Structure formats: structure tokens, C-alpha cells
Amino acid sequence: MFGDLLQNDSDIFIKQLDKDFHKSEKDLVEFIEIMRKWSETQKHFPEKPSDDLLRFVILYNKFSIEKAKQKLDNFYTIRSLMPEFFKTHPLNEDWILQSKIFYIVPLPKAADENIRIIFQKINPDYKDAKYYSLENNIVVFLHVMQYMAENDLCYRFHYIADFSAFTLGHTAKMSPLCIKKSQIILEKVFSNRIASLHMVNLPSIIESFINNVLKPLLHPKIQKRLRISSIDNLFKIFGKERLPKDVGGEEKSLSELTDMLTQQYKNHEVRFSELQNLTVDESLRPAKLQNDDLLGYYGSFRKLDID
């Protein structure tokens, strides 16, 4: 059941499937069945994945069954490797507050080619850098991604980050370790399905930080898709009707959209409670899928250690 926040059009979705992958809705159903039968042989999995979750790994991996298997395994396994990001619940009082400190919301209307837009902006009421934590920022983002994974028909996303409230005090809290970890999660779980990364309203000193410090830490695919842009340019690309009032658009404000997102988390409270406690049973893991630079050999994981 798709949430009220995300406006999905099944006809557009089916047409985009054909355009992107030359696949039909029937093909998708068949691929989900293949993945379901395989997942039943993975005794170390902590649950039987839902069709929605299987749809997510198939679409995010362009109908490659082998990649979908790897990413589904990663989806479960990485929760134990990075508990600081995944052992959280969006309805915990602290995380409700964090979602109001820096807004991160999927916008209701999808962009052209059925691509979701995610918009991020620091709440002006919390613009003092003392409120900012990059790790918390990543957790709030992952709550959004988890919600989208099982409740959205879009399988790519544009990311817009409004830096109007950013200062040098904020950049001082952007640890390279956290940035690297977020890149690993984007690649190993979400297959780097970011269509574009737009950074707007950058003070000149922050633009220098982005170009000289942040950009080199990003995955090469994301580096190529990064754009330092303007609000007017966003209007040309996405249309005012899709963008929030906060930047002169015609969509609801980020505060209103955050309240709608919180309501969706309440509607899916049980699922988020399940996700918070998922842990693979390594003693039951079958033969490895393949060697992995993060996970090492399956059943004998490497400790995550990033310089």
C-alpha cells in the first residue's frame, strides 16, 4: 500500500520499466518470484522478505538477479556492521527532533522519467552549528530511503541540498569517516541510484569546501552527477509545482512535508521496529555469493576500517 506522501502513477511506472529495461509488469512479477524462492534458501536471513522489498532490490539493480541477491544480502548484513546508522527508529523522540533540525523529505510529485526528488535543508530555527551532526543527518536520510524502498514505485532519485544555512561551523562537523560510510551504504545497499545531486544557495566559502574537500570523497559516479546550481535552474529542471514553498516552489513547505512523512512512519511503525532489530545469523550462512571489498568472505567479515 503506497503512502499518501508519495504520488505514484502505475501507468507511468510501467511505461518507464519498458523504456529503461524493456521489461513489463509481468516480468517484474516473475523476477520477484525468482528472488522469493532464492531468499527461502538463505537460512541466515532474519525474515522472509516482502514482495515490496524484493521489488526494490530488483529495480535498484536493473533486473540483474545476481546483483539483486548481493544487495538483498547486504541490506540485512550491513545492519550489524554499521549499527549506529541502522539500529534506530524514526519515531523515537530524539529522531523526531532530528528530522526537524535538518529537513530531509521525498517530494510528492515525481520528476520526469519517474524519478523521485529528495530535498534537504537545515531548519532556520536550528541554524546554529551546535545542533548539527553529520551522523544524525545520515540516519535521517536512511529513514527516508528505507521508507521509499518499500513504498515507492520510483527507483532512482534526484537529491537537492540547500546550503543556505550552512557555515564553517557545520563543515567542521562533516567527518570524512562518516562521509565514506555513507558512500559505502549508497553503493552496497542502494546501488548508487542517484540520478543527480544538486547543491544550491552555497556561500562562496562553502562552495570551496564542497569542491576541495567533499567532492573528492564521493563515489566517481556521484561526482559526475554533482551540480552546483541555482534555485532558478531547479525551477527549469523540475518545475515550481514540484518544489517546496521554502525555495519559492508551489509544493507544501518542508515543515508540512516532514509532518506528513512522520505520519507515514507511524503508519509503518511495526515495520520500522522490525528493521531496527534485524540481524543475520552468520552460523547459518550458506556458501558465499562472491568476495566483497567491504564484507570480505561471507561468514568471515572484515572489520570496517576506513582511513
Image (tube, grey):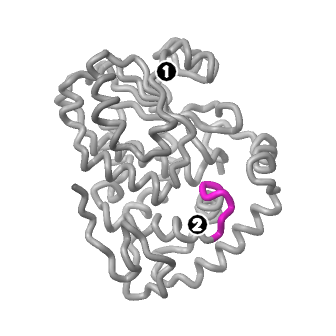
Residue situated in front as seen by the camera: 175 or 249: 175
Tell me, yes or no, whether the highlighted magenta stretch contains residue 299: no
Residue shown at the point (41%, 60%) measured from the top left: 273
Write down the region rendered in magenta: 59-65
- Residue 60: say if magenta: yes
Query: Dot 1: few (<14), some (14–19), or many (≥20) neighbours within 10 Å?
Result: some
Q: Secondary structure at mark 2?
A: helix
Q: Residue 150, position in %: x, y? A: 58, 54
Judge from the rendering whether residue 107 lies leftward or rightward of residue 284; answer left or right. Answer: right
Name the residue beneath numbered marker 1: 253
Query: Which residue: 64% across, 38% down?
Result: 115
Circle 1 SS class: loop
Residue 277: % across, % down = 37, 66
- Mark closer to the chain start, 2 or 1: 2
Q: Taking 223 as reference, is 180 above or below it?
A: below
Kind of residue indicated by mark 2: Lys
Residue 114 falls in image quadrant: top right
Residue 124 appears in view? yes
Residue sitting at x 27%, y 45%: 135
Which disc is residue 197 wearing?
none
Residue at label 2? 67
Label 2 vs label 1, nearer the camera: 2
- The answer to which quarter of the image holds residue 49 is bottom right
At 26% across and 19% down in the image, what residue appears?
205
Q: Residue 195, relative to residue 200: is it above or below?
A: below
